[in-house]
Image (spheres, rainbow, N blue to C red):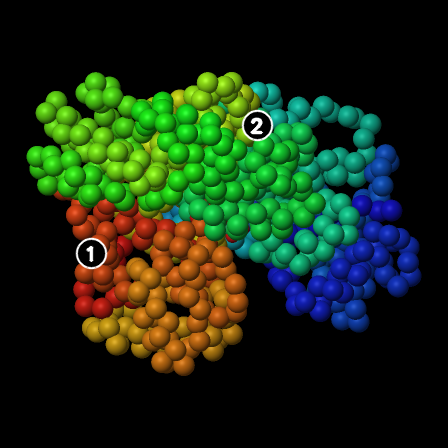
Amino acid sequence: MPNLIMTKLKGQDHEKAVRAKIMSFLSKLTEDDTLPGLHIEPMNEPLDSRARTGRVDIHLRAVLYCLEPLAGERTYVYAGTWEHEEAIKRARTRKLQINPVNGIAELIEAEPAVDAPAPAAPKVWTESAQAGAAPSSFLTEKSYFVADLTDEFGFPADLAAEAFAAATEDELLAFASDLENEWQSGVLLGMAMNLAISQIKESLGITEADDNAVVTEPAVADEVAEPDRTEDERLVEALKHPAAQMQFTFIEGEEELQRVIDGGDFGAWRVFLHPDQRRYATRSYKGPFRLTGGAGTGKTVVLLHRAKHLAEQHPTHRVVLTTYTRALADNLRRDLERLDPDLAQASAPGHPGVLVRGVDQLVAAVRDAAGTGFGAAAQSVLGAVVESRGAVVANDSGWDDAVDDADVDLPAALRSKSFLSVEYLQVILANRIVTKDDYFTVRRPGRGVALDRAKRAQVWAVVEQYRKNARIANRLSFAEVASVSAAWLEGADGESPRTFADHILIDEAQDLTPSHWRFLRAVTASGPDDMFIADDTHQRIYGQPVVLSRLDIAIVGRSRRLTLNYRTTEQNLRYALGLLEGGTFIDAQGGEEGVAGYRSSRLGPEPKSLPTQSASVQFAVLAAQVKSWLDAGVDGATIAVLTTSNNAAKDVHDALDHHGVASTILTNAKQSGDRPVILTMHIAKGLEFSRVILFDISEGSFPTPWSLKGVAAEDRDDVMLRERSLLYVAASRARDELVVTWKGKPSELLLRSE
Ligand SMILES: Nc1ncnc2c1ncn2[C@@H]1O[C@H](COP(=O)(O)OP(=O)(O)OP(=O)(O)O)[C@@H](O)[C@H]1O
């Protein structure tokens, strides 16, 4: 039975009925390619003697390349389904070859009569000739040479010259996004990011990435030259090159074929990984590893592939995939099933296979497993044995009562629940402080307010009162449950330590509290590939920055960044990044995180601002915008209105209704139905939509008045930073079009990108 390789090509988003015909054609082809009904025909005077076309229906033909490796099955590379004429033209004028410079399999186009020459750098392009010849070239301005493209990467000379003809970054990105070979777009995007040639080569897997210090073994064995292999065998190998796998995929079985055909561009993440993504998904690391990257750079995609990879490599291991909320975990579980419906998912914590849970769900499961041991373990965290089963409350509740009951003399800033709850989380629970003496001596890095001994004594009095009140009411905060569960896992109940995972993969890690981190460290056996952390410092919308080394999670030297944005257009990306200007963001290593280097391979319209003068006009403008998309045939479910609060979401729903537009309010991150959706900016975290409207980003409405209510002056900057991040999260949900509305004056956080 012949093998099949599918190719990702532009212009292949077929309707359902056509997809069914393609499926039928290809499944017959892989059963028996000699069936007469397939009409597999060679070309007349082709550029590539392997080229064939086959009959999909009366109008459509598939383009195929037939490889005959000596050892192994015949292999067809499917290069799309096209109208009859176009299919014949493509099959005659395109050749599947191994790029002579970089070894990547590629499709090149040329006139059939001409023997395809090996690409060579035009001699005229010397340093000085180039400077004179193309003064307005974007790539020249970035100090690249045409020879970089031709000699270093194997671009054909004409294509390299066209790339150098792009005068601006946008022109170059537009050119790159039209190229047929993904690896070529990858090189040009790398240049747009101003990467060194060696970095681009590493990123595309042309040379081995220089990070062996952090991996337990080289991921890919060096290619050994085999002179007796046929050209077709070499081509099959070149199709497995990491950069070729951005575009070509080997199909195993009918179900996978169906998934690839039905998935189209939206399903591309399941199959066509960037070499960087594939490396992070499959490499073995000596210890905790952190993958960071802006919104939409494919961090979640890497986590999903890595979970699958680890489960397949180690069928008896416990692989846990976790994230900040339960609803986000539900989405991860759904996507993992889409990635591989047959993947073994664990039924409960501690079982082999992949377990997907929100972090507090995991904590709850461990608490249940601990039984009475949980209460005993609390001694080391809270200084008292607690009831094993009690109510769980928010981390910031109970502080106002504690202040009143303790009757302390503290300045307003130190009496606020925002200060006290954060002090408790970041300092007291993080360090398992149970006595006043310990609190007197503990270091408090990163805390805005300095506390002298007298103030510490007063704060400690409130903490003791808070704990006393909690014992009387038989309640614990979420953070306390996580901290005590961590202690139980470590054996604080007097038993041996235990773990529930061999590998833990963490999404949205920037939002986790120190208690979560202590728990995640304890729940996972230490060793190779123990923790894989995906975060984006710029998307921290809850809590405070956490420096992982202070919590015994060593990621120094094992931290990498993804920069290619797969979600949004370049225009939306720039707008969203512009919203971060003016903020100082501290990452998980305690350093400052910048926004340089992010690029998208897709272009689209500039984000649109819709200023209005009153609430009613703003609603009318919003409704008109949604209607215009619906009238243009946009699928309703891909349109989202993001609001600053639940109440605003209700108002928008009613207003749209009033203007004749039916919509649905989303109260958690689970998407459903076919109407436009309305959701808060917080709930939009981790989601994406084709069209997004940020509604009422007005002075006085955003930042919301309650986000700053009762916040100590010292903590105000951090609240503003989180609000800025929230706006960035919201704006970065838009794949294709972004619209921002306000009434009166725009929010101060919007002004920078206006
Ligand atoms: N290799 C790929 N090919 C095609 N699409 C991809 C690829 N990788 C990621 N994507 C798509 O890009 C979008 C963003 O990916 P993902 O959600 O993994 O990014 P993220 O970095 O986790 O984003 P965020 O931090 O905003 O949640 C998704 O639609 C995903 O399917």
The numbered mark at residue 502 is 2
Q: For residue 375, what is the image quadrant?
A: top left
Q: In terms of secondary structure, where does tag 2 sit?
A: loop
Horizontally, is 283 left or right of 717 in the view?
right
The numbered mark at residue 705 is 1
Vertical relation: 461 (above or below) 648? above
Q: Is mark 2 within 8 Å of ligand 1?
A: no
Q: Residue at x 36, y 34 (%)?
A: 480
Horizontally, is 599 left or right of 547 in the view?
right
Closer to the camera in the image, 119 or 329: 329
Tag 1–tag 2 contact (CB < 8 Å): no
Question: Label 1 to label 2, Cα distance in Å?
Answer: 44 Å
The first of marks 1 and 2 along the sequence is: 2
**Three-letter residue code for mark 1:** Pro
Q: For residue 700, what is the image quadrant?
A: bottom left
Task: Give the crowd class for mark 1: few <14, some 14-19, many >=20 residues within 10 Å.
Answer: few
Q: Residue at x 38, y 43 (%)?
A: 391
**Three-letter residue code for mark 2:** Asp
The numbered mark at residue 75 is none
Closer to the camera in the image, 603 or 106: 603
Q: In terms of secondary structure, where does tag 1 sit?
A: helix
Confirm whether residue 212 shows in the render. no
Confirm whether residue 265 shows in the render. yes
Horizontally, is 122 left or right of 26 in the view?
left
Q: Split into 4 quadrants, where in the image is the C terminus?
A: bottom left
Across and down, in percent, residue 271 comes to 63, 46
